[in-house]
Image (spheres, rainbow, N blue to C red):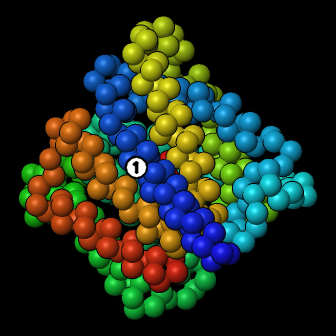
Amino acid sequence: MQEKNAGERRGIGMLFVAGGAILFASKGIFSKALYQRGVGFELVVTVRALLAMPLFAWIALRPGGFAPASPGEPPGTRRPAPRAGAVIGAVVAGILCYYVGALLDFKALMLIDASVERVLLFSYPAIVVLISSVMTRRAPDRRLVFAMLITWTGIFFAMGGIDAGELRQNLYGAALVLMAALTTALYFLIGERYTRELGSLRFAAIAMGASAVVLAVHFTLFRSWRELTALGGHDWLLLGVLAICCMFLPGLMQAEGVRSVGAQRAAIGSTVGPPATIVLAAVFLDERLNGWQLAGTAMIIASVLALSLGKAAVAPED
């Protein structure tokens, strides 16, 4: 009976991971719809974060009951008050990933297809392995090296491969996405250190809340809040969907999924993200990947599976 309950819990956890990955994958669709309506990427990133911030604040400030990072602990496990260093770590991770990374990523969505963006962003597990190897001064084993080679070859193909025109067209936007992938990798590496103390949901809530504050300061300094007056009802609806369905809900779903099934199984479940983006972009944006890009997508997904089986964990997305 206990095994049956554990199996059901793992199944539900995988559904959470896959569902969160699909919701994250839809981000580019709604973002491009807003761009087509004349809404700038900085306004989109800022309003998305500010709309989601009260929900994340509610999670972060709850006295208990948040899901911890460890799969073995039940929900509602009470923890001692976190150290200031752990909170600062979450704040730094949030600013890197959800401020710097988000601005780079949403800017890239103005330059390249949503499906290409999602595939390139999905390269961050290989970056995690690379940084971890440098930090520990230990070379990864042959399987992980092979997986990373597949990832970078897949990135080249996803950018257009030997089609020089496609490659040039995607080069700048792809470079922005790869920098965003680096911030996601750093988010994971910081989170790996502090989520056991804070809990996965509280860590994510503090990180995203901090990024919303910094984004508001950024917008005050470099843009004008008068831009809000130009937003119509349909714009606000799309922004609300971005904040709740493409940021808050998938963030919680992935955190709960990782808690239930562990990071390695969650990595496998998250591989539905790039194919989901390709399908959504084809249906709603009439985007079509060429043969080289489809081959690159397959290679990156295969490398994530190899990295997962090689015990390289992955992190939540932006």
Query: How many numbered circles are shown?
Result: 1
Q: Can see residue 213?
A: no
Q: Residue furthest right?
A: 80
Residue extending farthest top: 229
Q: Residue at x 54, y 60 (%)?
A: 12
Looking at the image, residue 78 lies above or below residue 236: below
The residue located at (46%, 30%) in the rendering is: 241
Q: Residue at x 46, y 51 (%)?
A: 19
Q: Position of residue 195 (x, y in %)?
A: 71, 61
Side of 199 relative to 49 (left or right): right
Q: Residue at x 38, y 21 (%)?
A: 39
Please state, as top left, top right, bottom left or bottom right, where the N terminus lies in the image: bottom right
Q: Position of residue 112 (x, y in %)?
A: 25, 43
From the viewer's perspective, tell me whether residue 54 is left or right of residue 130.
right
Indicate the quadrant where residue 301 lies. Answer: bottom left
| Residue sitting nearer the eye, 108 or 1 | 1
Name of the residue lying farthest toward the bottom: 142
Mark 1 lies on residue:
22
At mark 1, the secondary structure is helix
- The answer to whether any part of residue 240 appears in the image is yes
Bin the neighbour count of mark 1 within 10 Å (Cα to Cα): few under 14, some 14-19, many 20 and up: many
